[in-house]
Amino acid sequence: MKIVWYGHASFQLNIENKKMIFDPYQKDGYGSSFRYRGNFEDPDIVMISHNHSDHNFRDFKNSPKIIDKEGVFNIDNIKIESIKTFHDNEKGKKRGENLIFIVYSEKGKIIHFGDLGHIPSPETLKKLSDPYAIMIPVGGYFTIDHNDAKKIIENISPLYIFPMHYKTEFVDFPIEPVSKFLENNQNYKIKRKDYFDDSLEELENSIYILSIS
């Protein structure tokens, strides 16, 4: 399994000889305040958590399968489930709905939380429990912050954590840097990598800060 980060909430997941991209962004969606490169490879599957331009690029030349609705999908023997949540803590009144994606792999559940804006219900947390890897927003303002991210992590106990949607030199949004999240989760080992390849990693609770591809 390989995971690459394109910045913001966009990751590429390679499993079962398939390339999946979560929340690819439109590079020109927010002008000069959003400067991620968007060096996307052509994916087989694209998952879009909500229809904001920093999450909803669709115009790939190879016409991949796109999942942008709630449901359970089986694509080339890969099971993917999307769960409706909200982009805010007022049941979508501020920013609308959001999808959490679960990819079921041989290693376990791989979860992308999209722009989650609240702590999910106990029923949803139970479905998300004991995942192999999660990609979770930590920057606050538009999404959950580092405190709510920690509460979710404590409830579901992931092995590998990939924080996302935080302040970097490439985005001027009013969100927090990843440092507060790291300070808040010191029981996880912090690893800085260009990309994640689980064939090269130990089975230990870890937070991965990936370079931007």
Image (cartoon, rainbow, N blue to C red):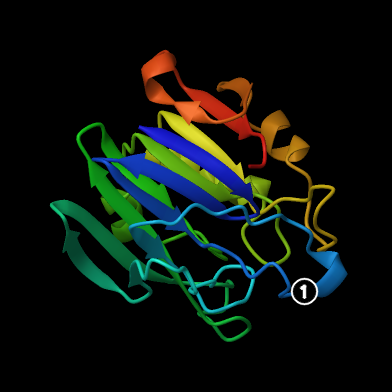
**Residue projecting furthest to the bottom:** 93
| Residue 103 seen by the camera | yes
Q: In this picture, is 165 found above or below 184?
A: below
- Tell me the amino acid under the disc marked 1: Tyr
Q: In this picture, is 94 found above or below 171?
A: below
**Residue projecting furthest to the left:** 77
Q: Position of residue 35 (x, y in %)?
A: 79, 59
Image mark count: 1
Q: Residue at x 30, y 74 (%)?
A: 70
Q: In what element is the residue under mark 1?
A: loop
**Residue projecting furthest to the front:** 61
Residue designated by label 1 = 30
Q: Is residue 189 left or right of residue 65?
A: right
| Residue 121 seen by the camera | no
Q: Residue at x 40, y 64 (%)?
A: 47
Of 161 and 212, which appears nearest the observer? Answer: 212
Q: Mark 1 packing: few (<14 Cα in 10 Å), some, or many (20+)?
A: some
Q: Residue at x 41, y 33 (%)?
A: 2
Q: Position of residue 18 (x, y in %)?
A: 29, 47
Q: Position of residue 22 (x, y in %)?
A: 46, 57
Q: Residue at x 26, y 61 (%)?
A: 81
Of 81 and 88, which appears nearest the observer? Answer: 81
Q: Position of residue 44 (x, y in %)?
A: 33, 57
Tell me where residue 150 sits by quadrant: top right
- In which quadrant will I find the C terminus? top right
- In which quadrant will I find the N terminus? top left
